[in-house]
Amino acid sequence: MDVIMLIKAFILGMVEGLTEFAPVSSTGHMIVVDDLWIQSKEVLGKYPANTFKVVIQLGSILAVVIVFRERFKDLLGYKHRTANKSSNLKLTHIMTGLIPAVILGLLFEDYIDEHLFSLNTVLAGLTIGAFLMIAADLFRPKIVTVENVDQITHKKALVIGLIQCLSLWPGFSRSGSTISGGVLLGLSYRAASDFTFIMAVPIMLGASSLSLMKNWMYFTPQFLPFLLVGFLSAFLFAYLSIHFFLKVINKIKLIPFAIYRLVLVAIIFLVFI
């Protein structure tokens, strides 16, 4: 495998890592960088590009697990916090938030794959999602009722899960929809972000695992370097991106990300359409 292929794997992993958990839609960026520039389907020939995308997504998932490792230990019962740091976030909160999207995803998976992964539908998702984020900033409750993720209720988790269903439309962004929904429900930006990232792990891991089982035969020595470079690149940039995002989200809020999405839509439209 030549160096050019490895460079492309690094770039795709970087794009995945930087955009998977920021509210800017990793799907929209992957279309620009991959389908409209690198064109990995042509590069890889008969090797399925979707399998590579699943692998780099696993790199991003690993980054979340490491960033929130103490929280996941609590959720799985491997660590007991002191009385001064009791955790009220339980697995039931996470499962409650996941149920709506999991059910709709299973029911409409084939339809989404066949009809919604086009450039026009992604641009629509990017645009509508941007306006949802702007609305969240402008119309959020004046009083924050949930300062940190330990204060979230099952009712709020369910409503956020229902709003997460919007992200089944490619380009809408899982984090964009759930953070916006959380903020509109009275969560602080940090609490909404924490819940979004934690909730993303099981649903992304489940979907990725199913895809890997279907395509396990493609993990050949010929393509392992390509997969490994992409995985490590996605992990590194996702790790940095998550730390940066959580540090600044309470200060800059969502409108700057919404503006970025609208600018991205304009660039894609002008350049490629």
Image (cartoon, rainbow, N blue to C red):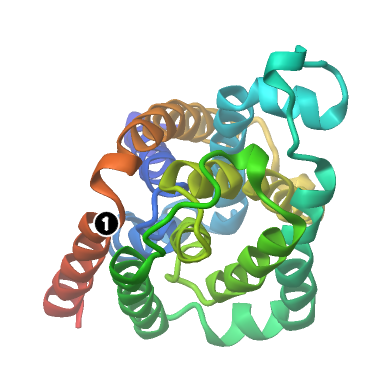
What is the secondary structure assignment of the residue under circle 1? Answer: helix
The spot of residue 160 in percent (x, y) is 61, 64
Residue at 45%, 59% (x, y): give it: 183
Residue 134 falls in image quadrant: bottom left
Residue 165 falls in image quadrant: bottom right
Other-residue count near label 1 (Cα within 10 Å), few / some / many at <14 / 14–19 / ≥20: some
Q: Is residue 234 above or below residue 110?
A: above
Task: State the residue in front, 129 or 105.
Answer: 129
The spot of residue 140 in percent (x, y) is 38, 65
The residue at which mark 1 appears reads as: 257
Q: Is residue 119 above or below residue 194?
A: below
Q: Is residue 5 above or below residue 87?
A: below
Side of 201 where 189 appears, left or right: left
Q: Is residue 219 above or below residue 215?
A: above
The spot of residue 120 in percent (x, y) is 35, 85
Farthest top residue? Answer: 82
Residue at 69%, 59% (x, y): give it: 157
Residue at 80%, 54% (x, y): give it: 95
Residue at 32%, 54% (x, y): give it: 38
Residue 122 falls in image quadrant: bottom left
Task: State the residue in front, 7 or 245.
Answer: 245
Side of 262 where 208 appears, left or right: right
Amino acid type of the residue that numbered disc 1 sits on in the rendered structure: Phe
